[in-house]
């Protein structure tokens, strides 16, 4: 499903990339995703569709595409999602059309999704998917972060911690793993991964033509 951005000065093209960030809630992936988008003009965010209610300050189409359950089921039946999953009693999914449009426009696409979504994307797009998992320094620190948010009840925090343990158990399904004990250092690590993956030979198209011109 990869598309090809415009050629560079040497006539080379690069396959578009699906760049996945996953972590337990509270481990910092959303903060790092925002920093990455602000720093990388050739990276665009995949905005998920969800059945959960809108939270204060959220904007439809920017934070999520908010849909009701009936519409979500219609989209599933019409194969309009690249991936979708149940999370805390709600449904979340990645609309296929928007991702294909961003790739066609020459953007790499950033996904802030869980291990289930990462697995489904890999099954569809294989080598065009790069998967990065972000660990908290410890489960105790993770709980402290969730409590400091002061946005969830004790029951919700307990549920998030139980889910976090399950998510961490899937770390070996990722290409890279990082520990977020310092957000700036973790951010630099993610940027390094993105830069290296963009330079992979397997993503460079037009190499044969370039080499022929170089050596004739």
Image (cartoon, grey):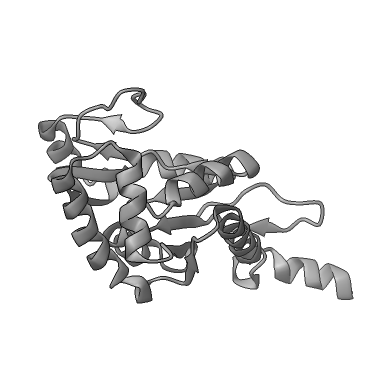
Q: Is residue 8 above or below residue 166?
A: above
Residue 24 in sight here: no
What residue is at 14 percent from the left and 37 percent from the top?
74
Residue 119 in sight here: yes
Q: Quadrant of the N terminus?
A: bottom left
Where residue 26 appears, as percent x and y from the top left, is 36, 51
Q: Is residue 203 above or below residue 80?
A: below
Where residue 95 appears, as percent x and y from the top left, is 32, 41
Q: Nearer the viewer, residue 37 or 120?
A: 37
Q: Is residue 47 above or below residue 8?
A: above
Quadrant in the rendering for residue 189: bottom right
Q: Quadrant of the C terminus?
A: bottom right
Q: Nearer the viewer, residue 78 or 148?
A: 148
Query: Which residue sits furthest right?
Result: 216
What residue is at 51 percent from the left and 49 percent from the top?
32
| In the displayed structure image, the side of residue 34 where residue 25 appears, left or right | left
Quadrant in the rendering for residue 42: top right
What residue is at 57 percent from the left and 43 percent from the top?
35
Q: Is residue 215 above or below residue 140?
A: below
Where residue 191 appears, as percent x and y from the top left, is 62, 57
| In the displayed structure image, the side of residue 8 where residue 185 appears, left or right | left
What residue is at 35 percent from the left and 43 percent from the top?
148
Q: How many marks do you count on the picture?
A: 0
Where residue 7 appears, as percent x and y from the top left, is 71, 51
């Amino acid at each position: 499903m990869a598309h090809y951005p415009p050629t560079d000065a040497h006539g080379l093209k690069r396959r578009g990339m699906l760049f996945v960030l996953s972590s337990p809630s509270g481990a910092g992936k959303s903060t790092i995703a925002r920093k990455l988008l602000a720093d990388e003009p050739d990276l665009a965010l995949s905005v998920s569709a969800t059945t959960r209610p809108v939270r204060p300050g959220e904007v439809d189409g920017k934070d999520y595409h908010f849909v009701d359950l009936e519409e979500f089921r219609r989209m599933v039946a019409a194969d309009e999602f690249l991936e979708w999953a149940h999370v805390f009693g709600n449904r979340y999914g990645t609309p296929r059309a928007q991702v294909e449009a961003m790739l066609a426009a020459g953007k790499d696409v950033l996904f802030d999704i869980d291990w289930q979504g990462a697995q489904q994307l890999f099954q569809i797009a294989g080598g065009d998917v790069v998967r990065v998992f972000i660990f908290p320094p410890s489960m105790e620190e993770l709980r402290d972060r969730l409590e400091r948010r002061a946005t969830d009840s004790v029951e919700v925090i307990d549920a998030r911690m139980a889910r976090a343990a399950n998510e961490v158990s899937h770390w070996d399904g990722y290409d890279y793993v990082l520990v977020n004990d310092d957000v700036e250092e973790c951010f630099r690590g993610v940027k390094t991964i993105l830069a290296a993956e963009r330079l992979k030979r397997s993503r460079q198209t037009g190499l044969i033509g370039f080499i022929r011109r170089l050596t004739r």
